[in-house]
Image (spheres, helix red, strand yellow):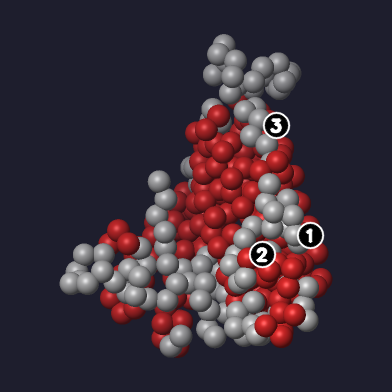
């Protein structure tokens, strides 16, 4: 995997993980303003990163595929393939 | 409804194959305290959960567990990739190989296929949440046991991540139990089942 793609994917994983953890916290602490603010902030960050990744390395989710003449969902590596 | 994302929750990039280790780690896919059972347990239990915030916890943790079994399967897949027939012949992996080749099949470390009899969906919030908290601890112990056997950094890192998530989930289920108890008669939590008896809210 090229370095730039690896970096971007790592950043998406990190930002998504913050949101995964916050989501569970907010389920049991729905009025926590700090957590709500952080979720909002990371949500904006994540949307930008995913848009950047999609433009450079193909779709991360199939719902957003629209701008291609050929179906490209299955043309990129699957996440379990690894580096070797 | 679920939507697939083309990424692992935590990256898996293993450079050295190790079929013996794969046979141990696969238990967190198809074993009695594995991620598949965890996901099915929470996603099944949520329908009878009368409190929306707790049904949300069951939905979100059940969903995260799907991501975790994908990580476990990726580890097993990469640990058994590109093996020759000779390498397989000299490894305990040969018993698995003869039934599944390099396909990923949910079994325990003992070789027993996955069984739904390892979990309950009792339809009683207190009962189900106690089972869920126990399940997170059992999975955490299994990861502790696995970590004593793993010496490859590439395998350790995702396993450590998964172990930490068991602890966070245990915490959230503990809070869920408190939410359920806050809805009930504090003098007798067990006088009725809020998921069945109509008189209570």
The disc, 3 or 2, on the residue closer to the chain's N-terminal end is: 2
Label 2, on which residue? Answer: B99
For discs 1 and 3, the disc positioned in front in the rendered view: 1
The disc, 1 or 2, on the residue closer to the chain's N-terminal end is: 2
- Name the one closer to the observer, B76 or B191: B76
Residue B47 x, y percent position in the rendering = 52, 33
Residue A2 x, y percent position in the rendering = 43, 88
Q: Residue at x 42, y 63 (%)?
A: B5
Tell me the quarter of the picture where residue B6 sits: bottom left
The disc, 1 or 3, on the residue closer to the chain's N-terminal end is: 1
Which part of the image, by quadrant, shows the C terminus of chain A? bottom right
Tell me the quarter of the picture where residue A43 sits: bottom left
Label 3, label 2: how many angstroms apart (C-alpha)? 38 Å
Does B187 sit left or right of A35 as displayed? right
Does B44 sit left or right of A51 as displayed? right
Q: Which mark is residue B127?
A: 3
Label 1, on which residue? Answer: B110
Tell me the quarter of the picture where residue B185 sits: top right
Residue lying at the far top of the rendered structure = B199
Q: Judging from the image, what secondary structure is the residue with disc 3 in?
A: helix
Residue B168 seen from this side: no
Residue A37 x, y percent position in the rendering = 43, 55
């Amino acid at each position: 995997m090229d370095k730039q793609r690896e970096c971007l994917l790592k950043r998406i994983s990190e930002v998504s993980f913050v949101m995964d953890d916050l989501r569970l916290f907010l389920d049991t602490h729905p009025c926590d303003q700090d957590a709500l603010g952080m979720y909002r902030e990371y949500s904006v960050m994540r949307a930008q990163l995913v848009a950047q990744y999609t433009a450079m390395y193909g779709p991360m989710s199939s719902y957003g595929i629209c701008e291609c003449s050929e179906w490209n969902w299955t043309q990129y590596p699957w996440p379990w393939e690894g580096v070797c | 409804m679920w939507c697939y994302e083309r990424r692992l929750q935590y990256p898996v990039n293993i450079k050295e194959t190790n079929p013996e280790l794969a046979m141990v780690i696969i238990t967190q896919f198809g074993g009695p305290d594995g991620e598949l059972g965890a996901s099915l347990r929470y996603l099944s239990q949520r329908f009878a959960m009368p409190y929306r915030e707790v049904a949300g916890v069951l939905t979100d943790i059940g969903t995260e567990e799907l991501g975790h079994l994908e990580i476990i399967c990726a580890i097993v897949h990469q640990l058994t990739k590109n093996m020759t027939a000779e390498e397989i012949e000299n490894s305990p992996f040969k018993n698995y190989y003869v039934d599944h080749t390099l396909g990923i099949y949910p079994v325990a470390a003992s070789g027993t296929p996955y069984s739904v009899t390892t979990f309950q969906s009792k339809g009683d919030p207190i009962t189900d949440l106690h089972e869920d908290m126990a399940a997170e601890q059992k999975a955490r112990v299994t990861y502790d046991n696995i970590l004593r056997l793993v010496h490859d950094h590439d395998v350790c890192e995702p396993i450590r991540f998964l172990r930490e998530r068991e602890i966070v989930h245990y915490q959230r289920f503990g809070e869920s139990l408190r939410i359920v108890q806050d809805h009930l008669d504090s003098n007798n939590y067990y006088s009725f089942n809020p998921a069945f008896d109509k008189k209570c809210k």
